[in-house]
């Protein structure tokens, strides 16, 4: 009987070395999942940083903007619009922030190297810590289902963190996307009062959909903002 070459080689090795295990090429890559798809959708753990919930919105708002690191501009060949682009062009080394270029540039003190570049606002300490912890936790492409409370909505605890993560980077005095500025409470109130805030987050026809990465706020987050507006936009 005539054996194929790979099988014959395995047979000969088995005779020579005993229990030798031979792997065929098809066995080497059994994971065909899309690396851009998040790994899970479990309830959020407060001790875990989630790429899709925490990291990507922050990068899209502050870094993946026109003339910087969106798909079209790709300054310095860096694109920060999804998991693959962040890992590859941001040169992320899972578990080691100090050897990850993205983290190094946001921690820079040299104005010629720091990102975002002046005169744009830098990430604050809490935002830098989010990226640091995410890398230390393995730089996973993970997501979670947020615990969304629509009964206890406050500006400081609910609305402003949402604006900082998803909006403020694109809407500063220096980089006022669409002519809209969101740098403090008064700015958010102004957008809420003229109807533009609800218009953009609900993706209404006459408004540009926001956040700009195309990921619409969850129904619960939209309801939180709507309820804050209905309650008179309190500053609490």
Image: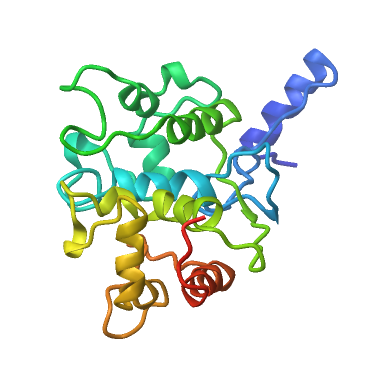
- Seen at 28% across and 78% down, the residue is 207
- Seen at 55% across and 29% down, the residue is 133
Across and down, in percent, residue 134 comes to 54, 33
Up the image or down, 12 lies above or below 194; here it is: above
- Seen at 38% across and 65% down, the residue is 214
Up the image or down, 226 lies above or below 185; here it is: below
Which quadrant holds the N terminus? top right
Q: Nearer the viewer, residue 15 or 206?
A: 206
Q: Residue furthest top?
A: 17
Q: Nearer the viewer, residue 225 or 83?
A: 225
Across and down, in percent, residue 63 comes to 29, 43
Q: Quadrant of residue 106?
A: top left
- Seen at 52% across and 45% down, the residue is 51
Across and down, in percent, residue 32 comes to 58, 51
Q: Quadrant of residue 48?
A: top right
Q: Is residue 179 left or right of residue 53?
A: left
């Amino acid at each position: 009987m005539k054996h194929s070459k790979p099988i014959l080689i395995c047979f000969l090795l088995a005779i020579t070395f005993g229990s030798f295990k031979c792997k065929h090429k098809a066995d080497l890559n059994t994971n065909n999942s899309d690396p851009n798809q998040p790994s899970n959708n479990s309830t959020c753990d407060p001790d875990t940083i989630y790429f899709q919930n925490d990291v990507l919105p922050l990068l899209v708002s502050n870094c993946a903007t026109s003339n910087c690191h969106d798909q079209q501009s790709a300054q310095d060949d860096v694109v920060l619009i999804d998991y693959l682009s962040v890992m590859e062009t941001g040169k992320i080394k899972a578990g080691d922030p100090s050897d990850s270029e993205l983290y190094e540039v946001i921690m820079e003190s040299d104005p010629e190297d720091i990102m975002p570049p002046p005169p744009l606002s830098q990430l604050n300490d809490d935002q830098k810590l989010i990226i640091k912890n995410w890398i230390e936790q393995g730089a996973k492409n993970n997501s979670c289902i947020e615990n969304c409370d629509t009964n206890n909505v406050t500006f400081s605890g609910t609305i402003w963190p949402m604006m900082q993560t998803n909006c403020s980077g694109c809407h500063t005095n220096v980089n006022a996307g669409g002519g809209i500025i969101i740098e403090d409470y008064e700015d958010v109130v102004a957008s809420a009062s003229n109807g533009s805030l609800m218009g953009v987050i609900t993706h209404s026809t006459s408004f540009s959909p926001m956040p700009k990465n195309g990921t619409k706020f969850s129904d619960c987050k939209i309801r939180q903002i709507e309820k804050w507006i209905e309650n008179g936009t309190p500053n609490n």
